[in-house]
Amino acid sequence: MREYYLEHVPDASFYANGLNSLANRITDLRRRILTSHYYAPNRRVTAPQLAALASVDGGYPIVNAQYGGLGRAFCESTGFAPQIRSNGTPRWWGVWSKGYDYPDGFVWQMHDAVATALEMIGWVDPSDSQHLPEEIPLLKTQYREGSCVQITVNSYERNRGARTECLRHHGFDCVVCGFNFVTAYGPCGENFIHVHHLVPISEIGEDYVVDPIDDLRPVCPNCHAMLHRTTPMLTIDALQQMVNRSALQTAQNKPLHTEPRAARF
C-alpha cells in the first residue's frame, strides 16, 4: 500500500474561506460529491463508491474528473499549491484527501480540516449520523479474523427531503418491530429513526428517482442492520416473521407466574 498526502494541510478556516469564495462557481454535482464523501464511514471512499453515494451519472470517471476539477479550481482561486507528482503534474484530488493505493483499489481519506470546513459553511450537518443509508460493501482489503467489515452508503436514504416525506407518510414507528424512540426514551428520542431503502442497489438504473412513500420505510437501527444481514437483503415481511416467531417462542418458554403460598403460623 502506498500513501499520498500533503506536506502541509491548510486549516479549516482556509478551506471554508476558499469554498465560500467559489460558491457561485461550484456546480451542484461537485458539491454533492464533496458532501457525500463527508458522510461516508470514516470519510474513506473509492471513486466508484463515491459515484454510488452521490448518485453520479457516468460513474467513477466523472467523479475523478469533478473531484480533481474542484481541487484545481480551489487552488487557482486561493493560490494554494497542490502536491506534485514525479512527472510534474498536480494531484488536484490531494487538496481534499489523503490517498491510499491498495492492490485492489484507490481510497480517498478526507482531510479533517476539509470536513470541519464543510460543517463551518453549512454544507453538511455533523449531527446527521442517524441517517444510515443502504449498505454497500467497502473495498475488499484483507481483514484479520475478528475485525469489522466496513460499510458505506448511498444517498437515497440520507436525502433530507425524501426522508421527511417518508416519515410524514409512514410515521416514526419501526415498520418491522414497532419500536418508537419517543415512547422508549422520551424527548431525547424525538424525530430519531432510520430510513430503509427497499430497492436493492443492483436493481437501480441510472434514471432511477426515489419515491419516498413507495421506496422508503422507517426502521429502528437494530432492524435496519438485520435487513442487511444477508445478501440479497431480507424483505421487511421476512424480518417481521422472524421477530414475531421469536416473540412467540419467548412467550412460550416464559414460566407461568404463580402466587406465593401464604405462610403458615
Image (cartoon, rainbow, N blue to C red):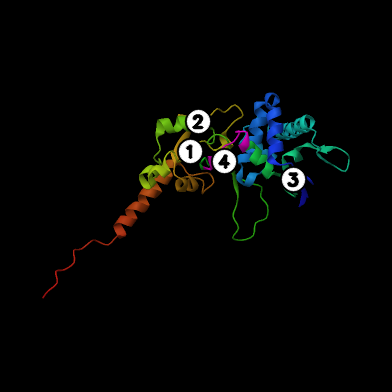
Secondary structure of the residue carrying tag 3 is: strand
Q: Along the polypeptide, which appears first: circle 2 or circle 1?
A: 2
Depicted 126 relative to depicted 243: above or below: above
Relative placement, left or right, of 177 versus 205 is left
Give residue 81's position: percent from left, percent from top: 81, 37
Residue at (46%, 42%) from the top-left corner?
Answer: 235
- The reply to whether dot 2 and dot 1 touch (C-beta < 8 Å) is yes
- Asked if residue 121 is among those painted magenta in the image, a careful observer would answer yes
Mark 4 surroundings within 10 Å by alpha-carbon count, few (fewer than 14), some (14 through 19), many (20 or more): some
- The reply to whether dot 4 and dot 3 touch (C-beta < 8 Å) is no
- The reply to whether dot 1 and dot 4 touch (C-beta < 8 Å) is no
Q: Which residues are magenta?
A: 119-129
Q: Amino acid at mark 1?
A: Val
Q: Amino acid at mark 2?
A: Ala
Q: Nearer the viewer, mark 4 or mark 3?
A: 4
Q: Nearer the viewer, mark 1 or mark 4?
A: 4
- Distance from disc 3 to disc 1, alpha carbons, whole Å, reads 31 Å
Secondary structure of the residue carrying tag 4 is: loop
Question: Circle 2 is placed at which residue position?
Answer: 162
Q: Along the polypeptide, which appears first: circle 4 or circle 2?
A: 4
Question: Circle 4 is placed at which residue position?
Answer: 126
Residue at (36%, 48%) from the top-left corner?
Answer: 244
- Distance from disc 3 to disc 2, alpha carbons, whole Å, reads 33 Å
Question: Circle 1 is placed at which residue position?
Answer: 195
Give residue 12's position: percent from left, percent from top: 68, 40
Depicted 136 relative to depicted 169: above or below: below
- Asked if residue 211 is among those painted magenta in the image, a careful observer would answer no
